[in-house]
Image (cartoon, coloured by chain):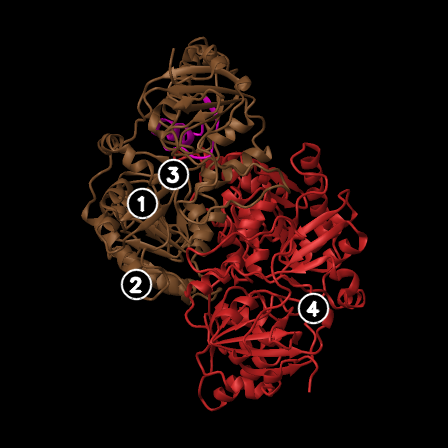
Chain colours: A brown, B red
């Protein structure tokens, strides 16, 4: 018997993953834990995937509707995606198998702001959630739960689901107990109050998630690590992006618009945001705090150096190397990290109150500052908007960053018209590439275009972009944010036809 | 001497509009009152326009940077726009002369969420505000101000401006005293607290705006009415839109997702939102409240009928006919209306807490639910995003509405790709035209497209849109939200070439 299941009635409900998965009828709606691979269930989804495989072998079909916090691990989106066992997916994913099925038109996926998940589920817009499938570190005697490296939307699914399947992961460090601050915006319409958070380190909730053991259908024991990927070492292009952001922030401090320790930083997920964190770790700012959605490697380094005083997030997802160091020193990190539900980590109310500095990657930005965070030309959706919209809309500074080109220069990150818009011109403070930072504040669309083209676009593309602007601005039509709609996507169409955005458009004198 | 200027030191500063305008140097940044024509200054901007005209006659140029709450009256945007006396305009406008100059490329205009104005100005992003030019109903003995029919961003400009020019409008009903609830999010980074509003009728601020009389450079007496336009009587197409919205809301109440009195409603500005209010006034919901930005005719009718119990807004702007009735019965309305700064009326924090029902017009919506609120094909920008983004992003229901066609059917409001995106797919609950309502919740982009085309598009355009989808979805590229980028704007290009979006695209079998 596991010491991790301290509630007596739940000890009696320990079953195998297969037995737990057998409780789930085809077509059921599942709400799972997980925010990135961190804290996602490991066993039950894989057992469900096997059920789907067996059904398929019998010429039948087994699928579920899969709601999560954000992305999950390969045991959830990978396993279920591979078997085509998902009918509907919400609100974010980042798995190759799942992505391939979505872009093959086989899975209906709704991409949504991460802060919206709690409210939309509670409003009842996604119907009855049949099962919450949630990984925990421990079940306490009273049935309350100690979560692991992620909160995500677990509190929401545990609150609304008809029945609960718990995965008690004995591989999760027990010292996670006490690191969570579970506060949900649980009131019905007319009853909701403020989220009383006034700094990154404010605590206003409980370290535990309350749960009536009677609602638990099954408990499954696991012992498995989160499978997070490694980061690439920062490249020169990433270092230059970080440098431009540091210059910008130093200027803001110098002009008195930001305090010397900055405001709480938010950092998106991936190699470039991680490289910017590395830059901040070598920069001039001390005693920083983070109010972000995910703690990744760079933030651990900043906590180590002392540059970062405190980090609030919804999850910790580290590369295998950092994970080892983190676990070794967890006692030291425990007091400097708080993990919150994503409805709180990404709350517009709190982000605006704190005046965060948002730093997120982009796929493409157009000349007027509209940002595509999700769609890759000719390929379809990559992951989803995630929390970038929550932070971009509400932060004091919203910085979007990317190398100026991809595919060896064949794709420009700066285009005349974004082929998908996730954050609009109204929500973007600055766009930055390795060439420079375009400060879009206090500028009209045409002024923004000049900034973006001259500071951010790759020199190979500047003549093409200038030429587009010149002709669009000279046209007789509205000159506020003019476009030549018959060639707005010429860059994309050239890439699709010729594999390169560059050739073909002649620059007129 | 005016009884409206009770502060003795300010009595001594009463001057003519010309004298006040003479204080303003060319290139100055002005922050004015006004939220629509309501409460905008009447005399000083016109005097500035005359200065610009005189400068022009001398072969010189006189221009200012004009920051406001939202749109203003003809005395501000009309007069200054006509003289080309504005170098930079922020954050919203709705005046024909100003619009023409912007779309002629002569004025740099930055279109911004109305809730962002307060924070962005206080962050210092718009530089020093040289003068606040604010219309008030009265100056009290201690120098504090009684505002009139609008709060807008007056509190912000009065807070940050170097010097203040007051227009004391003796034509404003003195019974406005007490109708305001001035609460500003004034703390610097790290010091801001919650906005303690939990219902439309919560009061948390002061009825007055505090002001140190020493900062006042001039007081100008005026006696002029706000010049708001009349509404058109609801047409059949508007009534049908209202009917679909009522059906939807009734369904939500029936399914327990909305309370019987709904949640606080927000209504955009214009004929269609006003017609929807007329529909709600004849509908089944009782004891409603409004948490909105502008009280227009339809809301007064709802207050009269008792359907609406209380309305919170940033301004009251009525047609001349309703204005007469409103003034006659102001004593009765005083207790059922509160006027707030726009940073509060449009606050994401409050809108999300209250779970508002947002109802805004749109210019065009694309098949995947991205909404263009601002740009008209071949013409440029119309007004601006206003508060639609604040409410769309944060409300429990975000409904966008428009007739399915414009220009006698020659323009479709539903297009393959929106020619400008103001609210993205992530922020739109429902799209509605006279043909029906597309419920976009819990749907993937392709599912949304089917809903929008089959329920909302005009029948003339459905075959064209279906054909576009069929071919885009059959293409080899990503099938999550597929587009044919070489004909994404074919509707727009046909309209620009031929004056009609319909002909020319052959429907393939």
- The residue under the point 61% across, 74% down is B135
Find out whether residue B183 is within the magenta segment. no
- Tell me the residue that label 2 is attached to: A251
N-term mark: 1 or 2: 2
**Residue A126 percent coordinates (x, y):** 56, 31
- Tell me the residue that label 1 is attached to: A495
**Residue A69 percent coordinates (x, y):** 44, 33
Say which chain tag 1 marks. Answer: A
Find out whether residue A99 is within the magenta segment. yes
Left or right side of B146 for B484: left
Say which chain tag 4 marks. Answer: B
The N terminus of chain A - image quarter: top left
- Tell me the residue that label 3 is attached to: A338
Disc nearest the viewer among 1 and 2: 2
- Tell me the residue that label 4 is attached to: B177
Q: Is residue B433 visible?
A: yes
Measure how far apart labels 3 and 4 are at the Cα level: 46 Å
N-term mark: 3 or 1: 3
Q: Is residue A83 visible?
A: no
User: Helix, strand or loop at disc 1?
Assistant: helix
Q: Is residue B387 above or below residue A143?
A: below
- The residue under the point 31% across, 45% down is A495
Say which chain tag 2 marks. Answer: A
Measure how far apart labels 2 and 3 are at the Cα level: 30 Å
């Amino acid at each position: 018997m596991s010491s991790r299941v301290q509630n007596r009635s739940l000890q009696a409900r320990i079953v195998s993953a297969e037995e737990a998965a057998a409780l789930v009828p085809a077509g059921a709606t599942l709400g799972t834990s997980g925010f990135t691979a961190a804290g996602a269930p490991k066993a039950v989804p894989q057992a469900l995937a096997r059920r789907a495989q067996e059904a398929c072998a019998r010429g039948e079909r087994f699928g579920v509707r899969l709601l999560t916090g954000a992305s999950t691990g390969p045991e959830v989106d990978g396993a279920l995606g591979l078997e085509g066992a998902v009918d509907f997916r919400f609100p974010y994913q980042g798995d190759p198998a799942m992505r391939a099925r979505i872009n093959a038109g086989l899975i209906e996926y709704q991409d949504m702001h991460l802060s919206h998940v709690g409210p939309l589920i509670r409003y009842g817009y996604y119907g009855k959630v049949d099962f919450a499938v949630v990984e925990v570190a421990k079940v306490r005697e009273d049935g309350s739960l100690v979560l692991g490296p992620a909160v995500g939307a677990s509190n929401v699914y545990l609150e609304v689901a008809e029945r609960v399947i718990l995965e008690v992961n004995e591989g999760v460090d027990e010292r996670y107990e006490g690191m969570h601050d579970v506060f949900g915006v649980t009131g019905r319409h007319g009853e909701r109050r403020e989220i009383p958070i006034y700094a990154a380190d404010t605590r206003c909730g409980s370290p535990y998630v309350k749960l009536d053991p009677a609602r638990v259908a099954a408990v499954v024991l696991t012992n498995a690590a989160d499978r997070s990927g490694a980061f690439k070492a920062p490249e020169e292009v990433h270092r230059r992006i970080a440098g431009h952001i540091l210059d910008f922030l130093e200027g803001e401090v110098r002009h008195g618009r930001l305090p010397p320790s900055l405001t709480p930083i938010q950092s998106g997920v991936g190699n470039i945001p991680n490289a910017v964190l590395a830059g901040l770790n070598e920069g001039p700012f001390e005693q920083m705090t983070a109010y972000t959605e995910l703690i990744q490697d760079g933030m651990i380094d900043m906590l180590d150096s002392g540059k970062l005083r405190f980090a609030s997030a919804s999850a910790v997802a580290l590369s295998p190397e950092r994970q080892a160091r983190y676990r070794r020193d967890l006692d030291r990190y425990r007091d400097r990290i708080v993990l919150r539900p994503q409805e709180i980590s990404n709350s517009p109310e709190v982000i605006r109150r704190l005046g965060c500095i948002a730093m997120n990657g982009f796929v493409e930005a157009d000349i007027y500052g509209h940002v595509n965070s999700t769609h890759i030309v000719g390929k379809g959706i990559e992951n989803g908007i995630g929390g970038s919209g929550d932070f971009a809309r509400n932060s004091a500074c919203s910085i979007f960053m990317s190398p100026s080109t991809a595919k060896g220069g064949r794709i420009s990150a700066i285009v005349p018209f974004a082929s998908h818009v996730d954050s609009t011109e109204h929500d973007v403070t600055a766009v930055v590439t390795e060439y420079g930072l375009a400060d879009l504040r206090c500028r009209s669309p045409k002024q923004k275009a000049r900034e973006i083209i001259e500071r951010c676009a790759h020199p190979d593309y500047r003549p093409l972009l200038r030429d587009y602007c010149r002709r669009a601005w000279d046209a007789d039509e509205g000159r506020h944010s003019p476009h030549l709609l018959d060639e707005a996507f010429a860059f994309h169409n050239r890439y699709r036809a010729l594999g390169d955005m560059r050739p073909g458009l002649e620059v007129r004198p």
